[in-house]
Amino acid sequence: MLGLFHIPLDECEELYHKLGSDVFKQNVIFGTMKMGWNHAFYDSDIWEKMLKERMGSDLMIETARNPRCPKVAAVSTIVNRGTPLKAFVFRNYNHLPGVKSHYIGGCQYKLWQAIRASSAAPGYFQEYVLGNDLHQDGGLLLNNPTALAVHECKCLWPKVPLQCVISLGTGRYESERKNSITYTSLKTKLTNVISSATDTEEVHTMLDGLLPPDTYFRFNPLMNEDIPLDENRKEKLSQLRTDGIRYIERNEEKIKKAAKILIQEKTVVQKFNEWIRLKACMCEGLPFFSKL
């Protein structure tokens, strides 16, 4: 909503509440029965219908016609190509000729398909079939896609140093329960595996150590309660909002610093170098340049 359609933040918040109450609405008994049929508690058809109504038939690449539209990608996980699982990137851009990303994907897909595929969280929605591939939520493989985003940037703008990387988390909850147990249940073991597979902070720790100073900023509020993905009760969402506001207040200087770096204008040298690179890419493959 924000990146592709430039919808104001207030409207984004309003739509978030509306979508949450419409999508995550299910009778417990019927939802449990559905889990047995197709491993999805919620009605994936309703979610798909809502996406089609709101997004229409526009393709990802068509958003690039707007000069104010940034490069945007959504990540899903392909689960039917064997192991290891494969990340799939829905892009609204093309890479330059000869540049190959580590990640498969494309820009010829519809907007609603990208959202449907990348939000197919196991247990919540059914997998999404697209062509010969079976897609699930990208968080299954890359719950923190910042490293993927950095790689895509390197493909788009090779040899251009990173100016600023902003990583926005969805909140984290840290349990402080400690005990001296010598045995864990199967449920605990599975919970630990899932928690480890969907961890976001390890990627943050790695990037924080690798990227240059004053380049990388991560904002991820600490929550007072472990809120599930499908929570839509007003009091719980209000608590999330309060946690977020308190986090912003505590990190005001960090946010200002990141904003200052983000709005820096390009220097004359940077603009000239970009112009040279663009001309070189446009001329690549022409007979005259091929002989040089």
Image (cartoon, rainbow, N blue to C red):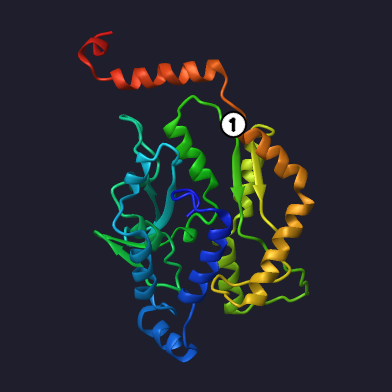
How dense is the environment of label 1, judged by Cα within 10 Å: few (below 14), some, or many (20 and up)? few
Asked if 9 appears above or below 107 in the picture, the reply is below
> In terms of depth relative to the viewer, which is nearer, 113 or 78?
113
Which residue is found at the position 41% from the left and 88% from the top? 33
Q: Residue 97 appears in which quarter of the rendering?
A: top left
Q: Residue 262 placed where, x, y %?
A: 61, 35
> In terms of depth relative to the viewer, which is nearer, 277 or 272?
272
Residue that numbered label 1 is attached to: 163
Q: Residue 160 placed where, x, y %?
A: 51, 26
Q: Residue 71 appears in which quarter of the rendering?
A: top left
Which residue is found at the position 59% from the left and 39% from the top? 165
Residue at the farthest left position? 287
> In terms of depth relative to the viewer, which is nearer, 253 or 130?
253
Q: Answer whether residue 84 is visible to the viewer in this image.
A: no
Position of 138 compared to 261: left or right? left
Which residue is found at the position 51% from the left and 65% from the top? 15
Which image quarter holds the C terminus? top left
Q: Residue 187 placed where, x, y %?
A: 58, 78
Position of 281 compared to 216: left or right? left
Q: Residue 83 placed where, x, y %?
A: 38, 58
Q: Residue 173 appears in which quarter of the rendering?
A: bottom right
Position of 176 compared to 14: left or right? right
Q: Disc 1 on helix, strand or loop?
A: loop
Position of 258 compared to 131: left or right? right
Asked if 290 appears above or below 197 in the picture, the reply is above
Q: Amino acid at mark 1?
A: Gln
Asked if 74 appears above or below 193 in the picture, the reply is above
> In terms of depth relative to the viewer, which is nearer, 79 or 50?
50
